[in-house]
Amino acid sequence: MLQISTSKLKQQIQLLSNIEHEEIVITKRDKPFGVVLGFERYQELLKLEQDLEKAKKLQTLKSLGSFELGGDDYKSIKSSMS
């Protein structure tokens, strides 16, 4: 069974209440290990990641269309994807 003092519990609750305003970086041996952030911020980051992936795919499709029309060669298209 896990035991925790009331003062430590209050400190942890205070930390968690701060995630609405700022992220908490968790360190391990003085190096960043993880991040705790609010759910809304997490959703925003997921949406940004999805939008970026869509933009990359659209750019790839445009490049492939250009390649078929005699535009960029395969190597430049491949390098733009990475």
Image (cartoon, grey):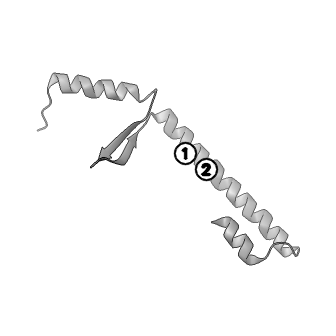
24 lies left or right of 53: left
Figure quadrant of residue 24: top left
The vertical placement of 30 against 22, above or below, is below
Q: Do the numbered discs 2 and 1 sit on residues whose CB atoms are within 8 Å?
A: yes
Q: In x, y percent, where is residue 62?
A: 79, 63
- Whether 19 is drawn above or below 78: the answer is above
| Few, some or many residues within 10 Å of mark 2 (<14, 14–19, 20+) | few
Q: Residue furthest right?
A: 69
Q: Residue at 43% of width from left, 35% of height from top?
A: 23
Q: Quadrant of the C terminus?
A: bottom right
- In three-dimensional space, the C-alpha distance between marks 2 and 1, rounded to whole angstroms, equals 6 Å
Q: Badge 1, how many Cα within 10 Å: few under 14, some, many 20+?
A: few
For numbered disc 2, what is the local secondary structure? helix
- For label 1, the residue is 46
Q: Position of residue 35 (x, y in %)?
A: 39, 42
Tag 2 residue: 50
- Tell me where residue 73 appears, x and y as whole percent: 78, 76
